[in-house]
Amino acid sequence: MSSPTSSPPGWKAALRSHEFILLAVLMAEWVSFYFAGTHHTSHGTFGFGTADAQADILRHTVEIGLLALVMTPIILTGGIDLSVGSVMCFSEIVFGKLWRDAHMPIPIAATGALLTGAAAGGLNALLITWLRLPPLIVTLGTYSIFRGLAEAVTRGADVFAEFPASFTFLGEKSWLGVPVQVYVFVVVAIAVWLLVHRTTWGRSFRAIGYAPEGTRFAGIPVERRLALAYVLAGTVAALAGLIYASRLNQVTAADGTGYELAAITAVVLGGTSIFGGSGTVHGTLLGWVAVAVLSEGLAYANLPRELGGMLTGVLLILALSASILPKVLSNWRARRHTGTSTSQPPPPAST
Amino acid sequence: MKRNLMLLLAAGLALVACSKSDSNAPSGGGDKKPVIAMLPKNKANAYFISCSKGAQDAATALGVDLRFDGPTKTDPSMQTQIVEGWINQGVDAIAVAAEDKASLSTALKKAQSKGIKVLSYDADVLPDARTFFVNQATPEGIANTLVDEAARIMDGKGEFAIITASLVAANQNVWIAKIKERLAKYPNLKLVTDPLPSNDDKDQAQQQAATIMNAHPDLKLIMAICTPGVPGAAEAVKQAGKVGKVHVIGLGLPNENKDYVHAGVTDSVVLWDTGKLGFLTVQVANALVKGTLKAGDKEFKVGDTTYKIDGDNILLGEPTIFNKANIDKYDF
């Protein structure tokens, strides 16, 4: 938690950090839903407070969590990837085609899907670094291209289903009470965290976001760093697709619709600056869980699940302003106490 | 800093307070009142809204707690998610209209393993994932009603054409086969051409209807067997100025066809009563929970009405014919 606040001692800074605020919000959500959404009956406890419910919340949102994880380095560089949901879907379609129509074994088909994702990410990276097009425009284009490909291949109607149990265990089974895909998620989360926070690569992501030209002049291969971020996103999007396919035991051309925005929401809620340069992977994780618990908890509390979208928006604005508020307040107080002389720039010279 | 925490605390408390106030209503009585959860394909769709009204009527009459929830668009993953939520909440029965058989069946089997009664309505799941399917209409029921209605309007003789969804649409192809079987009963009804595809699109249905009227000037009736096809055909007849000369019937929603029915363009539309479908579904769910209905039963009684059970299909009965006389009573 290295928030760039200057003055107070370490623990105070930590309390004031965005991650801490988010953690507090998450606890508040969790406690609220625990009390509102759990009921005890003569034949057991049901609802939000059960281990099954908690496991299901994770199972239902692991795909978005994966996308949010790999969206973090991209946004750190000041970029964005709107294509992850479409890439996820198209990779699934490739998987379905290879398995069902080309009669490939599951491991080969899955590898094909992951390679598709990597190639899709590579295409994004190529267009962004080579043609120097803005990521927003490039990925808006590939967002349509890959969704369109998925729809064209299936004609929007073909559905791949009834995968073998050797594949569906990934999305449907649990191990030691924890859904199988959560283990996959933990591995990816640790890898991305290490990449962003413990390697020079990670430092260069932030540097690119902060000052792309400066980073280039400092001798850092900006293009290669960017390419890594986008290829990683494409590959993990394909992985998310495989998990999604095995969880639902089906693949359609509508899979992953809107997932890119859910992932971006988690990243931004997690405190990563949309302009790049600052942010953390653990922040993203907290942002992801906060949204997941909110949207699923509502149903357990018998509240309309449609409130989820609105409350996520409120949460986003509240959490982000709460972390800026103390700074704004202290600036304002400092200005009032010390008068205008110290904290304000000298008045412009007028003739 | 202090302000900051206070703000958080206030926000947290507000959240608890607002969700608490809503929670004590339904979940409090969970032990006594059976909870029946009902999943539509799309809860914003007029078809399912009218289904839910019938379901609520039944729930009120039976004193059960009905939870009607579903996606607001085509979304099989959301359907699964909602069902899994209900399993965790320990509801007593789950009734589903499946967008996708395979994915929902996995979740439903999990529900069954936890002792929850499972049934399907409107769109079935895999047979081993539910006890009963409340079947709104058999292919014979639909085909026979349509052909009989056509014969009545055409006085048992003349040319007619069929507009279908697409040439590969599974439901429609079954109906077409049954329609042809029924036509044996009316030797003077002549189907002039193979069914014309509209791809479930009103404009294409309208074009097909216009073309077939030009090609067969003696055509007496157009039968559209997909919902956008009926208003499409009616529009073509109206624009060709052949109202009364070429009749239109079909499988359609009352609301989409009211204007044409009142204008005399469309004679009647055929569909099941969706309110009754919702009503019967909740009745069956409740009977399963109470143990008064079991797999293998041959009939199911609600008040004075007896519903036939064919294997594990509970039959809603013959479709309803909506015409000038009754169409305004329905809103879906």
Image (spheres, coloured by chain):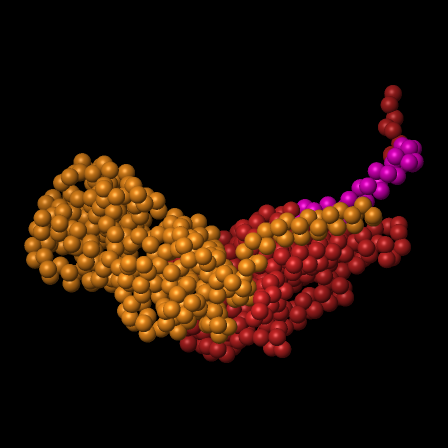
Q: Is residue A7 left or right of residue B221?
A: right
Which segment is the magenta one? A315-343
Q: Quadrant of the C terminus of chain A?
A: top right
Task: Please give the letter of the chain rendered in orange.
Answer: B
Q: Position of residue B269 (x, y in %)?
A: 24, 48
Picture quadrant where residue B121 is located: bottom left
In-image side of A265 versus A337 (left or right): left
State which quadrant residue A181 falls in. bottom right
Chain shown red: that is A
Nearer the observer, A278 or B39: B39
Q: Is residue B106 magenta?
A: no
Q: Relative to the observer, which residue lies in front, A335 or B117? A: B117
* Residue in the picture at 26% in, 59% down: B317
Q: Residue at x 20, y 44 (%)?
A: B267
Which residue is at the front of the view, A8 or B52? B52
Q: Position of residue B49 (x, y in %)?
A: 41, 50
Q: Position of residue B88 (x, y in %)?
A: 55, 66
x, y percent for residue A253: 45, 60
Give the main secondary structure, helix, strand or loop, of the magenta stretch.
helix
B224 to A238, vertically: above or below: above
Please indicate, yes or no, whether residue B102 appears anywhere in the rendered image: no
The answer, for residue B133, to whether it is visible in the render is: yes
Q: Is residue A338 magenta?
A: yes
Q: Quadrant of the N terminus of chain A?
A: bottom right
Q: Residue at x 9, y 51 (%)?
A: B156
